[in-house]
Structures are given as structure tokens and as C-alpha cells.
Amino acid sequence: MTAQTAPNAHFPRLFEPLRIGGITLDNRVVMGSMHTGLEDRLWDTPKLAAYYAERARGGVGLIITGGFAPSRTGQLLPFAGKMTNRADVLRHREFTKAVHAEGGKIALQIIHAGRYGYTPFKVAAGSEPSPIHPFKHLKMTEQIIWHVIRSFGTAAQLAHRAGYDAIELMGGEGYLINQFLCPHTNDRTDKWGGSTENRQRFLVEIIKDVRRKVPREFPVILRQSVADFVKNGQTFDEIALLAKRAEEHGVDAINTDIGWHEAQVPTIVTSVPRGAFVKFTERLRDVVDIPLIASNRINTPDFAEEILERGKVDAVSMARPLLADPEFVDKARTGRADEINTCIGCNQACLDHAFVGQKVSCLLNPRAGRETVLTLGATRTAKRVAVVGAGPAGLSAAVSAAQRGHRVDLYEAGPAIGGQFSIAARIPGKEEFNETIRYFTRQLEINHVAVHLDTRVGAQELIDGGYDQVIVATGVVPRVPAIDGIDHPMVMSYADAVLGHREVGKRVAVIGAGGIGFDVTEFLTTDESPTLNLKEWEQEWGVTDDLDTPGFLTEPRPMPAVREVYMVQRKPGKQGKSLGKTTGWVHRAAVKMKGVEQISGATYDRIDDAGLHITLHDKEGNEVGKRLLEVDNVVVCAGQESVRDLVDPLTAAGVITHVIGGADLASELDAKRAIRQGTEVAAGLP
Ligand code: FAD
Ligand code: NAP
Ligand code: SF4
């Protein structure tokens, strides 16, 4: 056996080569398609090329691009990325060249948005409008259908000319092909609607046209929805039949896809159990012989290896994990899995950005999508740097500065690193946040940061320490609102409640309904063992295994709440408006399922032995009544205040001082800003 073919010592299955059509991937990690926002404008071409190149350099088996439309009617937005002519081919060559120069492989994803287009020019299979997008669409005529079919073939042909190693046809997530496949959106009565065969005709004709226009060895991958999670979605028989027909007509691999964008089942947020949907892919093993690729909530090499070991899927698709750490694959290959910056499924800088038209990045890796502008090159003038506070801001500053070659002392008042993020990690469904603590622990170690725990450092010590620069990342403390009775023994901060410093009774009022108010409410209503097993999670969200149930949806059966909780805020109107675009609905649904009473437009009169006394107001601010919430405890989640006591004395003493994270600004603070500021301040050091 040659060295090249010897199994990898750490993850033998993951690093087995995989043949897809005429190409062989070095390993079984496929970077799933992600729209970064860099696809759409010509001037972003070098940035997108650099982003792909960094991931190819990190060793991923195959990169699948964000979706590019085969025609103007299929664009995700007006002027969005497309592959329709020779000018597009020239642009796309920049991507393929950049990836090939790093020894990687790249496939173009061809997507027609259908009714999911954010454009007034959109067309779709049926009459049902999109519930999540504005603009009416035009129901496709026979002529338009054939035009779109041929445009897929042409886009594939152009992709081949542009040097792509493969193409992927987006047939899931509720985009046009998926819209044809499901009665949910296909109400046609002609040969493109009605029977299963008719609904599948559109995709089959696309595959035939693509195959006519590209060489047989050029791989065609189908992104196939294996669980629509919408009413009148496909049954398993339909999915299996489609997979079989796709294989017969020349598809070389099936990359499986879960859930439409409008589905009311979470499919990728952090609270979804890891690998929750792999079984939907595995079911196709007995149906087709071509490679099957599993996806969704697979974020570590160990877990990927475990899936592959089961022997039913051939590769794993990871999209966000490669945003979080472009070196994911190389680290796994060389036995450094503990150095991986593991995606925590928060969506805060990736999908949340995409859905509001902002460029995609990563909460954990602010360089993602900014590879050409945020660089962390080695310093030529190593400095002595003190970082105060080991929350996300201080951790990212310390690690990034040390990676650049500075000598870093990190001071933390508490007994462990993590700051407020460690409290977050205790929330049910946020267990992934522990991976970030593990990542930083390891990075501090390998980058030789001197960590001083249990050390509340003062300004004079820092001044006496003779540091060249000091980074103040002292974060925040919970706000104590001025409410009569706030010092009553029944009142506690969110930190005390979540960290278990205080016992919490059976009836609780939560003051504040921001991100932390929602998290704490979920914590208080869920039982002690926070992680739901997959069966319980499926029951909560109404997912069924029954193969005959269209869309695999059933009646949700939530676990009962373990406490009676009131969530109160002063603002009138719906609670949770500030939560993430793609995750907020999950939190709102979760507290609703637990029967939490949400009270808005309240003012806090007092807290006494009887409970929390509030006055209620309507939307115009007029008083409409008074209420006593008879509770055992009040948990305060009323925002935070910055800890900045070091800043003035350090500045007065002439020390070069940087202030980042919560210490800089407590309002609208999250770990995304904290980590970004930490990385940027380190990048800006000499
Ligand atoms: P902090 O995390 O407050 O860290 C500051 C650190 O400095 C502390 O460890 C403190 O002990 C130390 N320190 C202070 N003074 C000194 C001193 N003089 N000497 C030495 N050490 C000192 N954010 C998100 O983005 N997404 C989420 O989903 C999310 N969920 C959350 C859920 C909960 C329940 C909570 C509580 C927070 C959540 N957050 C979330 C918020 C996120 O944790 C904070 O925004 C982030 O931790 C702020 O980082 P920081 O480094 O600025 O400050
Ligand atoms: P927040 O979202 O700003 O919410 C603070 C809450 O406290 C609001 O409901 C506010 O509502 C209330 N409040 C503010 N001042 C008050 C006062 N003086 N008295 C009584 N109530 C008061 O902040 P947070 O919940 O503390 O979260 C902190 C940050 O962590 C957030 O910015 C968030 O981005 C981040 N986080 C994110 C997530 C996530 O899932 N993405 C989860 C948790 C935390 P009223 O003013 O209406 O009363
Ligand atoms: Fe993962 Fe959050 Fe980064 Fe998105 S922003 S890639 S979900 S860690």
C-alpha cells in the first residue's frame, strides 16, 4: 500500500477518496452551497475567489458555490449572480482558477428561485404565492417552462467551459424545482402537475437537457429534498422514485436537502440535534447506487466519521462549519481536530445576514468573506500586550494577537474563560457554545498566551506591568433596574438563575424579553437535563418517521413546561422583535409551546412578598389596568452595563489602550461584535 492510499490515522472514512462521475474527491467533505452576497456584483469577484481559495487550501474535498441563476427569471434578487453568457464564464473562471491553484475542486450550483425570488420578474410552477417574499409571480406557461429547462442545460454547459469540476442542480429548499415536485405549490392541471410523474417531469427534463449539453464524465449532482416539512410535501415513495429516475437519467450523486425556507420546523439552528436528518438520507441507500451526501447540523469530524461508518451515506456536506473554520479538513486530517473552530449553528453572521441582504460572515470567524481585507499577518515588531477579560472579545483579541507573534498576557477575574458566553452555553439548545470555549482554550495553549485566571487586574498593575498596549475587554454586568423592591430576596439576576447560584421556584416572572429574556425563559421552562433527545425534539416540532405522510409533518407534542413563567417587557407589541432573523421564530415558537404568558406594555410598580406588581398600558401608552403576578421569584434580564473602570486611569497614564466588546458599548452587544472587535484590534496592532 502506498503512503497516498494508506487510511488516515484519525478519520479513515472521512479521508477515503470518493468518485463522483468523472472526478475523484480527496476526501468526503463537501462544502455545501452558501450564498455569501459576494456572488452578485462584479467588483466582489476577487473577494469571492479569495474566500473559495482559502477553503480549497484548507483541504475540503469539493466546494459547491452559492447559487447562480440560469436565467433572469430565476435570480434570487435583481442583478444577482447568474450563469447565462460568455461574460459570466469569464467571471466564473476567476473562481475555478483560484480553487484549482490550491489543488481543490469546485462545482457550480445552478438555482432557479421560482416563487422564492426577491424580484418582481419571478415565475413559478403554480399559483400559490411565497409566504416569505413580497412580489407576485407569473405562473409559468408551457413556453416558459421549456425555456427554463433549456437554460439549466446552457448554464451547465457554460459551467463546464468556465472550468468547474461539476455542477449541482438545486432541487430542494422550496426553490423552483422543488416547487414543481410538491402539490404544496404545484396546482397545475397540465402535464407538469397532478400525478407524481407529471410533477417530476420538470426536473427529469432538466437533467436530460443538462446531460445532452455536457460530457458524460462531467459530474451532475442533484440537491434533492428528502424531507420538505411543508403541508402537501412529498412522500417517501415519491422521493425514492425521483432519486431512482435522477440516477437513470445521469445524475452522479445526490446531495440531500432538508426543509423549505417556509417550513415551521427548524432545520439548521443550534437547538436542532446534531445529524437529526441523516436518517432521511440513509433511507435512499437501498434505492440508488450513486453517492449520497448527508447534510444539516454535521459540524465535527468525529460526528462526520460516525455517520460515514454507518455505511449508508458516502459523504457529508458541511457549509457553515467551513465558514467558521476554513482549515477544518486539514486540521482533522492531521490529528488537530481539537483546534477546529466549530460552527455553533447560531446563524448570526451567516444566514441572518443573507436574509437582510448583508454580506455573509461568521460570528466566530469575522475573516469569513473578508479574507482580502481582514488579515492577521505575522508582526515584525512583537509587542507585550495585556488583554483584560476572557469573554469572547478578550479571547479573540488575545488569540489573534498571539497568532501574529505578540507576547500576550490574558487576565480574567473569574475562575474560567468564557465570560457571558459561558452562561449562554448553559441554555438548553445552546450546548454547542461549549465548543467555542474548547476552541479558545486550545488556541490560548498553542499560541502561548499567558493566562491568569482568578486575577482581577487593576489599572496600577497594568501600568506597572510595562505593557506596550492594553486591550480592555472587561465586558458587561447585568443591569439592576430601579424598581421598588429590587433588593427583595425573591429577585435574582439571569446569571444567578442560569449558573445555579440560587434556587428558582415554580412560578417565575422574567423582567425583560430580549435575547437573554427568551433564553432564560427557555431555561426555566425546560427540565434539568437540557438536551432533548432526537425523539423528543421530533415530537416537539411535529416531525414524523412515517414514510407515507406527505412532508413528514405531524401534530407537535411539546414537553410540558416545568415552571409557570411570565415574560414581561415595557415596550408595547410583540416580544422578541430584536431576535435573529432566522432564529427568532424558533425562540418565539419555543416559549409559546411552553405556555409562557407574554406581557408587553408593562411598568414595574414594586416587588414584595406577594410577587411582581405591574401596571398595563395599551399601544398608545394609556393605562389599562393593574396586575399582580403571584410568583416565587423574579429573574431580571433587563440588559447590561459596561465595565469600564480601567479605561480612564490607563488613558490618563498614557498607556495605549483599546476598548472592545461590552466594555466598549453594552447596548446591542453580542458575541458577533465582541469577537469581530477582538480580531480587528489584533489585526490593527503593529
Ligand atoms: P463578557 O462576556 O462580559 O466578558 C468580560 C470578562 O471580563 C468576564 O469574564 C469578566 O470576568 C472579565 N473581567 C471584567 N473585569 C475584569 C478585570 N478587571 N480583570 C480581569 N477580568 C475582568 N451572544 C450572542 O452573540 N449570541 C447568543 O446566542 C448569545 N446568547 C446569550 C445567552 C445568555 C444567557 C447570555 C448571558 C449572553 C448571551 N450572549 C449571546 C451575549 C454574549 O455572551 C456577550 O455579548 C459576550 O459574552 C460579550 O463579550 P465580552 O467579551 O465583551 O464580555
Ligand atoms: P436586550 O436584547 O437589549 O434586551 C434587554 C431587555 O431588557 C429588553 O426586553 C428591555 O425591554 C428590557 N430593559 C432594558 N432596560 C430596562 C430597565 N431599565 N428596566 C426594565 N427592563 C429593561 O439585551 P439582552 O436580552 O440582555 O441581551 C444582550 C445581548 O445578547 C443582546 O443584544 C443580544 O444580541 C445578545 N443575545 C443574543 C441572543 C441570540 O439568540 N442571538 C440570545 C441572547 C442574547 P423593555 O425596555 O421593553 O422593557
Ligand atoms: Fe456557524 Fe454562527 Fe458562524 Fe454561521 S455565524 S457559520 S452559524 S458559527
Image: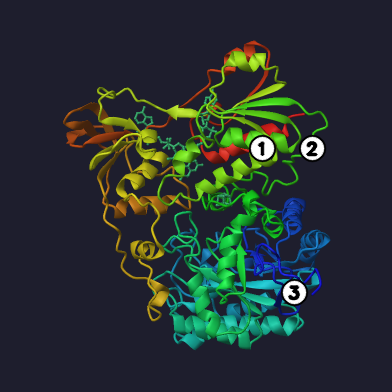
Q: Which label was assigned to residue 399?
A: 1
Query: Which residue type does callout 1 highlight?
Result: Val
Dot placed on the residue nearer the N-terminal end, 1 or 2: 2
Spatial CA span between label 3 and label 2: 36 Å
As rendered, which of 224 and 618 lies closer to the eye?
Answer: 224
Q: Circle 2 is placed at which residue position?
A: 378
Q: Residue at x 69, y 55 (%)?
A: 331
Q: How many residues crowd mark 1 within 10 Å: few (<14), some (14–19), many (20+)? A: many
Q: Quadrant of residue 377?
A: top right
Tags 3 and 2 touching, CB below 8 Å: no
Q: Is 41 above or below relative to 310? A: above
Q: Secondary structure at mark 2?
A: loop
Query: Which residue type does callout 3 highlight?
Result: Thr
Q: Circle 3 is placed at which residue position?
A: 24
Dot placed on the residue nearer the N-terminal end, 1 or 3: 3
Disc 1 Cβ-to-ligand 1 distance below 8 Å: no
Q: Residue at x 53, y 85 (%)?
A: 286
